[in-house]
Image (tube, rainbow, N blue to C red):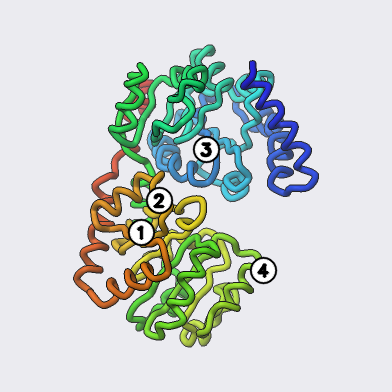
Amino acid sequence: MLYTFALHLYAVATEIASFFNRKARMTRLGQWHTNGILRKNIDRSARYIWFHAASLGEFEQGRPMMEAIRARYPQYKILLTFFSPSGYEVRKNYDGADVICYLPFDEPYKVKKFLNLANPYIAFFIKYEFWLNYLTELKRRGIKTYLISAIFRPDQLFFHSYGKWYRKVLYCYERLFVQDEASKQLLEKYGITNVDVCGDTRFDRVLEVCDNARHIPEIETFTLDAKHVIVAGSTWQEDEEILIPYFNAHPDLKMIIAPHEIHREHLLYLHSMLRRPSVRLSEADSEALKTCDCLIIDSFGLLSSIYRYGTLAYIGGGFGKGIHNTLEAAVYGVPVVFGPKYHKFKEARDLIACGGGISVDSAEQYSKCIDDLMCNDDKRLRSGAASKNFVIGNSGATERILAATVQQNDTPT
């Protein structure tokens, strides 16, 4: 069929690109090792629950489910697959799963080989995973498959007249657990009724991270006695062109900036824009942390704990393809500011609606927003409280999904 032929062309293109592109090369080599990993590590006497996450963001959504299953249902083992190197390379040593590997391309012979080796008991696909051949084969084999933390929009392929052929993929799921009522109503309009509104498991994840947030001595030294601290996370150049001029002009303000890209050229670019003392975390000693005004985070894995040290948070990406994770900051009870490209992100729209989030579309708007928040303590505190309450009020998706899936399929030991 045309879909499979297109996937085959994509696989060939990836193989060709792997000679020139590092990400494509990692994908090709990672998939090449998958069958060997499964042969070596899958325990044929065990029952596996399979989680597939396209990348790191989807992994974070699935993580509360994996960890709850691991804690309460020790009779199961966890198989975790990724499609993107940005997910696999960061989490390939995650101790919450028993087997971790890349997911091969959605070509029929690769699908059958993978499922023969993995032989999952239950499968969970996270948010936006609609691999037609995998889902069709899982259904044919009678393996219950669920979609979690999903969100649907009318502009998706399934809901266009020319995408009707692809809509059948949605019937392969045992149940679809969606984030909002609008998604459920849209699916029901097209005859898909096996849908439950359960919310987004990321709320559970960020609450867990908040409860176990790391104390980072370097950050504590840097923020000691600071009146106001902006934590700018996952920033791109378009964000930094707004953030840094404002910071340069406000000597009473400190800033922690965690750029999305931490390669040498980008870090040098940041230093070139800064007109006040700055230091990279990897190079900071006690004296530098006490005297500098801007701390540049040049490593991964700390940002979700660093937000706790801010007076407010700025989330990058909103002047490019779309904003990054707002919930990681909101859970700490701070106002969350971001750029104009947020409309595809339900949590960002809801943060604005409740008063915890603020969108800006220019340097002038950003300046006015920050001035307002810094000069008005009551407004800033109300906005921060709205952020925290929003996260707490939307938690609980993990428990609801577990009750409707794993709990129904087995009895906990």
What's the residue type where badge 4 is placed?
Glu
Identify residue for label 4: 265
- Residue 342 is marked as 2
Identify the image quadrant of the C terminus: top left
Expressed as whole percent of the image width and height from the top left, the position of residue 127 reads: 45, 35
Q: Could you say whether the residue bearing mark 4 is in a helix, strand or loop? A: helix
Compared to residue 283, the image places residue 199 above or below, namely: above
Q: Are marks 2 and 4 in contact (CB under 8 Å)?
A: no
Expressed as whole percent of the image width and height from the top left, the position of residue 229 reads: 38, 75
Give the camera-side residue of 349 and 128.
349
Q: Nearer the viewer, mark 2 or mark 3?
A: 2
Identify the image quadrant of the N terminus: top right
What is the crowding at mark 4: few (fewer than 14 residues within 10 Å), some, or many (at least 20)? few
Distance, label 4 to label 1, CA atoms, is: 29 Å
Compared to residue 277, the image places residue 38 above or below, namely: above
For marks 2 and 3, the one nearer the N-term is 3
Distance, label 3 to label 1, CA atoms, is: 29 Å
Left or right for 33, reference 203: right
Residue 2 visible in the snapshot:
yes
What's the residue type where badge 2 is placed?
Tyr
- Residue 359 is marked as 1
Quarter assignment of residue 217:
bottom left
Q: Could you say whether the residue bearing mark 1 is in a helix, strand or loop? A: strand
Q: Could you say whether the residue bearing mark 3 is in a helix, strand or loop? A: strand
Q: Could you say whether the residue bearing mark 2 is in a helix, strand or loop? A: loop
